[in-house]
Image: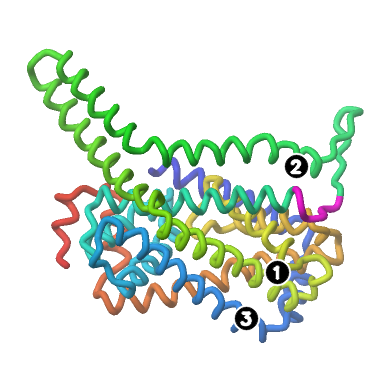
Amino acid sequence: MTRKVAIGLIVGALALALALWGVPLGALAEALAQMDKRWLAPIGLLFLGQQAIRALRQLLIVRAVQPDSRYWGNLAVLCMAFLCINIFPARLGEVVRPYLLLRKEKVPLGAGFGVVFVERLVDLTAVLLILQAVLLGVEIPSRVLDMGGYTVDVVAMARALGTGFVLPLLVGVVAVVVAGERSVTLARRALAWLTGALPQGRMRGAVGRAGEVVVGLAEGFVDGLAVVRDPARLAAILGLTALTWGGTGFMYVMLSEALGLRDFIGWAEGMGVLVITMLGTTAPSPPGFAGVYEAASRGALALFGVTGPALAPRAVAFALVMHWWLFIVQAATAAWFFTAEGMSIGQLFSLARRGLSEEETSEVPS
């Protein structure tokens, strides 16, 4: 983990330097000072509304495997887990939500990972669809690079790559959903064949135990995937997903209004900045995605014309405010739930570092 943390810190520092490149700190401070701060409250309220909708979507997924699950418990799980995802190094926060679902909503650990997997699958599909729509439907200024005597239109190339890769990826997502139960059956057969082929002894026992853990988690994933095969539940999940992602575009409109960038960033352009920034933060990052978020956001804004000496300070201000204002709002909601639940971030960090198992999670009292 130490190596991953070090890489994340280095990438974050380089990305922050890139985000601030060519922007005098005085000009950045002036852009922040001139921002219409009255827009911060509605942006924060819209974000809180999105959290509420995400919790409802999570509840729909969870109830497929735990019918007695409650909305309030799912909201608490979501708020606490998302803060951990933001602040834990090396992506350790990703394992917190299954543990919290086990502790608060009695969702088996494997099924909890399945719930998270389904949510990520749905969000990935949404990101790919939004990206494809932006590439094909939003006017993006041409960006031509001269490389060794050849001119390359970066925007045209991105559109071609999007068309060539997004559709196959979407087909792959559907294939995973359809073949879920068959994959578990094949895994069980393969495990039985492998353990049968091994001689009696410790090796066979170790392989058998490890294989059962893997197959058990796979069954949990399938339990989670089962929700997307119920048409009514699927329609509700997709509707809530569209509402969540679509609402984010309006946060970008509000902030562009606050910073005087409405001539460049409307709702559609905001959705483009959103997905490009989200894809950028998949790179190795320090806690909080510090630096990486800002670099990805500034790059995305530049694609839509927010670039040049006069606009670059406002682009960096946009990235900083969107990132850290929402972080503050999210941290405040998580802190409330941590206090109400009598839990600590340190406790969850310790569990995440060790890795989760049914035995380990039973050590922590409900």
Position in image of residue 184 (x %, y %): 29, 34
Mark 3 or mark 1, earlier in chain: 3
Position in image of residue 196 (x %, y %): 15, 17
Mark 2: few/some/many CA within 10 Å (<14, 14-19, 20+): some
Residue situated in front as seen by the camera: 313 or 239: 239
Displayed quadrant of residue 364: bottom left
Name the residue beneath numbered marker 2. Answer: 159
State yes or no: discs 3 and 2 in contact (Cβ < 8 Å): no
Helix, strand or loop status at disc 2: helix
Q: Amino acid at mark 1?
A: Ala
As for residue 118 lying within the magenta part, the answer is no
| Image position of 318 (left or right of 146) | left
Residue found at the far bottom of this picture: 38
The secondary structure that most of the magenta stretch takes on is loop
360 relative to 330, above or below = above
Query: Could you give the CA–CA distance between mark 3 and mark 2, rounded to whole angstroms?
Result: 34 Å
Query: Could you give the CA–CA distance between mark 1 and mark 2, rounded to whole angstroms?
Result: 28 Å
Position in image of residue 188 (x %, y %): 23, 29
Mark 3: few/some/many CA within 10 Å (<14, 14-19, 20+): some
How many numbered callouts?
Answer: 3
Query: Could you give the CA–CA distance between mark 3 and mark 1, rounded to whole angstroms?
Result: 13 Å
Q: Which quarter of the figure is the N terminus placed in?
A: top left
Residue situated in front as seen by the camera: 36 or 119: 119
Name the residue beneath numbered marker 3. Answer: 40
Give the residues drawn in magenta, as a range.
136-141
Residue situated in front as seen by the camera: 345 or 257: 257
Residue situated in front as seen by the camera: 73 or 301: 73
Helix, strand or loop status at disc 3: helix
Q: Mark 3 or mark 2, which is nearer to you? A: 2
Q: Mark 1 or mark 2, which is nearer to you? A: 2
